[in-house]
Amino acid sequence: MPAIRADRRLQTGQALAELALVAPALLFMAFGVLAVGRIAQAQMAVSAVADEAALTAAMASTANGAVAAGLERGQQVANGYGLDASSLQLTVDVGAFGRGGQVRVSARSIVRLQDLPLLGWAWISVASTHVAPVDTYRSAWSAGGAP
């Protein structure tokens, strides 16, 4: 009987040692999955910000109005997705604004992972660019209805 008890104690100790070796790797993988999910969500949000801002800017009457409308809409969409406003960089390039032209919007945000254990040191920059055409056959009149 004493040999069986000693064997069980050795097996218990071995299982504890294996757990001590495997647990950090499992935790790192679990927090890594959370980080990848947050980065993917941020990438989709930045893409939506660039898309919405470009489409809104392309509908404006003037180049200055396009820049203002694009920046405002981009901030609204970013707030809706919960992006950090302090790390969001939004650029609206109207170029030669007019019929048949293009509006290019670039959005960039930094995803900080400081709230995730084991990954608190990490940050990732996500970016997206969207180009929206200015309608060739749109009216040259302003939104007020006067030429």
Image (cartoon, helix red, strand yellow):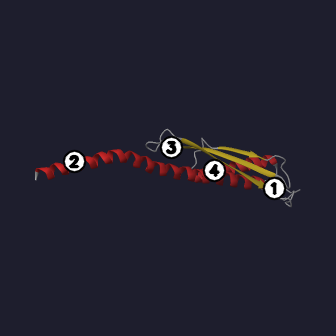
- In whole angstroms, how far apart are the C-alphas of marks 4 and 3? 17 Å
Classify mark 4: residues with Cα within 10 Å, few (<14), some (14-19) or many (20+).
Answer: many
Q: How many marks?
A: 4
Secondary structure of the residue carrying tag 4 is: helix
Residue corresponding to mark 3: 113
Taking the image as shown, residue 65 lies to the left or right of residue 115, namely right
Question: In which quadrant of the rendered image does the C terminus lie?
Answer: bottom right
Where does the image place residue 130, in percent across and percent down from the top left?
A: 72, 52
Residue corresponding to mark 4: 46
Secondary structure of the residue carrying tag 3 is: loop
- In whole angstroms, how far apart are the C-alphas of marks 1 and 2? 75 Å
Residue 134, labelled with which disc?
Answer: 1
Label 1 or label 3, whichever comes before in sequence order: 3
Residue 10, labelled with which disc?
Answer: 2
Taking the image as shown, residue 122 lies to the left or right of residue 145, namely left
- In whole angstroms, how far apart are the C-alphas of marks 4 and 1? 22 Å
